[in-house]
Image (cartoon, rainbow, N blue to C red):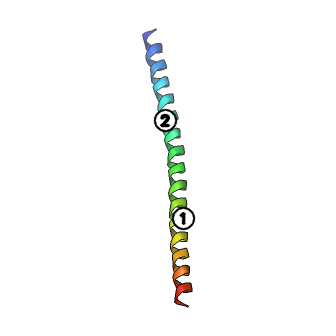
Amino acid sequence: MKKNKVLAAAAGAGLAGWAAWKQFGQFKKELEKSRSSEISRFINACRSLEAQEEKQKQ
């Protein structure tokens, strides 16, 4: 009886750990997406500024 409780607790802890790891993986993906989109926006803003400077020089 005691052995079954220990096994059930270990299985529950393993399942909770797996769920947390999966959620962390999803969070990491979302973070990478937002970071890459921020970088893209920054690069586009720089290009836009460069284009404006070129127009002003002409």
Using the numbered discs, state the Cα–Cα distance from disc 1 to disc 2 in whole angstroms.
Answer: 31 Å
Q: Residues within 10 Å of mark 1 (few under 14, many from 20)?
A: few
- Tag shown at residue 8: none
Which residue sits furthest bottom? 58
> Could you tell me which residue is drawn at 47 percent across and 32 percent down?
17
Residue drawn at x 50%, y 64% as measured from the top left = 39
Above or below for 29 versus 3: below
Q: Amino acid at mark 1?
A: Arg
Q: Residue at x 55, y 75 (%)?
A: 48
Amino acid type, label 2 = Ala
Of residues 9 and 41, the one drawn nearer to the viewer in this rendering: 41
Give the x, y percent position of residue 19: 52, 34
Where residue 20 appears, x then y in whole percent?
Answer: 49, 35
Instruction: Decide: is 18 above or below 4.
Output: below
Q: Secondary structure at mark 2?
A: helix
Badge 1 element: helix
| First along the sequence among labels 1 and 2 | 2
Camera-side residue: 29 or 18? 29
Q: Which mark is residue 41?
A: 1
Judge whether 50 appears above or below 29 on screen.
below
- Residue 42 location (% of width, % of height): 50, 66
Cβ atoms at labels 1 and 2 below 8 Å apart: no
Q: Residue at x 49, y 39 (%)?
A: 21
Residue bearing mark 2: 20
